[in-house]
Image (cartoon, helix red, strand yellow):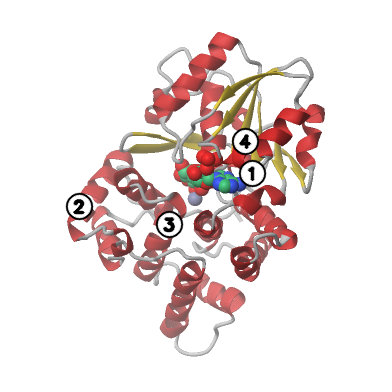
Amino acid sequence: MNNFEYYNPVKAVFGKGQISKLPDLIPSNSKVLLTFGGGSIKKNGVYDQVMTALKDYTIIEFGGIEPNPQYDTLMKATDLAKTENVDYILAVGGGSVVDGSKFISAAIHHDDDPWKILTERQVIKDTTPMGCILTLPATGSEMNSFSVVSRGKDKLGFGGDPRLYAKFAILDPEVTYSLPKHYLGNGITDAFVHVIEQYLTKNINTPIQDRFAEGILLTLIEEAPKVMSEDKNYEARANFMWAATQALSGLIGSGVVHDWATHMIGHEITANHGVDHGRTLAIVLPSLLRMQKIDKKERLLQYADRVWNINSGSEDEIIEAAIVKTETFFQSVGVPTTLSAYDIGESAIDNIVTSLRTHIPADLGENGNITADKVKQILTNAL
Ligand code: NZQ
Ligand code: ZN
């Protein structure tokens, strides 16, 4: 096992009706910037629950944070937060609103151009405390210190600074009832691939992390059909929500070897073609696994056996069967596994690869051996 430091200060407040606990979580007399997205929280009753809970607080609202939160929008929120001198941020939404609010919380205090936090990895100066109410289980942003911000065709991540963790994350499975199937499928896929990128790498004797990871994968596989077909199955939504949070809270990633190539390639597909984050991963991952069959052989065999119960045939047959199972799983939650499903053809591939190399000049993957040519091949095989 590799050396690691594990620190997660986020207070998870899980279950039905927990939004009413807001006054216990946000210091009284706070002036709160309430950040949200395109309006789903006004249709599903979450906004009303928040306003009722915070009736004694001064609230400044900022709505309109878009999926793949845009820098320009976040800077408008930052300006508002500064003008109003807010001292707390409450993010209510999916990963985009939570990520965007992390950025706002740092941008408020940044003397230089905040975009340089992303492009030049400038160290943040300070943050305004932020709490969140998660409405879409997927990214794990509610319990990690990472954030992804977009500016036109640049989609860049930052994080790792402990001041970027939310102070609390309210996780009420009932708020997911209003999610369209499209976003449920995205969320299941994203959480699944988060686990895979920390698990299907190298065997360095990490049985605890492996079994946690396999537990999350098996839970997602078991709960997905119920989540997709039963609109108000509380237990299924609860298990899905906690699985997605734990997929990227840092626990299963401590001391293991990480990959993240699928995510890096996926971000370029989103930035250049507007495909939702989770959907890009379902395009890239199966093709990447086929490309990396030899590097990942030991782990793929373990994955095939312990997650899919596939253990007969040649090694190559076992691995291929596990990859097919993975593809079929994504398809079962309504998420396609090819570029052509989004009308993205061969002519688009060079541009995606060039854009990737501009953002990340290094070769990708746990062995740093996924070159630009290999990315091109991965995408071509995913047509
Ligand atoms: O904007 P509203 O109206 O709220 O609608 C949203 C949005 O259109 C809707 N939605 C959310 N909760 C809902 C709901 N609709 C009905 N009922 C609800 N309860 O869902 C749509 C998508 O929301 P979004 O927040 O964009 O989705 P997601 O949570 O998948 O977040 C994606 C963003 O997170 C980043 C992605 O790159 C992308 O920018 N990621 C962040 C990570 C992190 N911080 O660790 C890791 C991930 O790998 C990922 O990169
Ligand atoms: Zn992701």
Locate the N terminus by quadrant.
Answer: bottom right
Residue 279, which numbered label? 3
Q: Is residue 253 above or below residue 23?
A: below
Calculate the distance from the C-alpha at mark 3 to the C-alpha at mark 4.
Answer: 23 Å
Q: Nearer the viewer, mark 3 or mark 2?
A: 3
Locate the C terminus by quadrant.
Answer: bottom left
Q: Nearer the viewer, mark 3 or mark 1?
A: 1
Residue 44, which numbered label? 1
Calculate the distance from the C-alpha at mark 3 to the C-alpha at mark 1.
Answer: 24 Å
Locate residue 194 relative to residue 236 in the image: left or right: left
Q: Please name the residue that numbered disc 2 is placed on.
A: 350
Calculate the distance from the C-alpha at mark 4 to the C-alpha at mark 1.
Answer: 12 Å
Residue 92, which numbered label? 4
Query: Disc 2 vs disc 1: Cβ atoms closer than 8 Å?
Result: no
Q: Nearer the viewer, mark 4 or mark 1?
A: 1
Query: Disc 4 vs disc 2: Cβ atoms closer than 8 Å?
Result: no
Query: Disc 3 vs disc 1: Cβ atoms closer than 8 Å?
Result: no
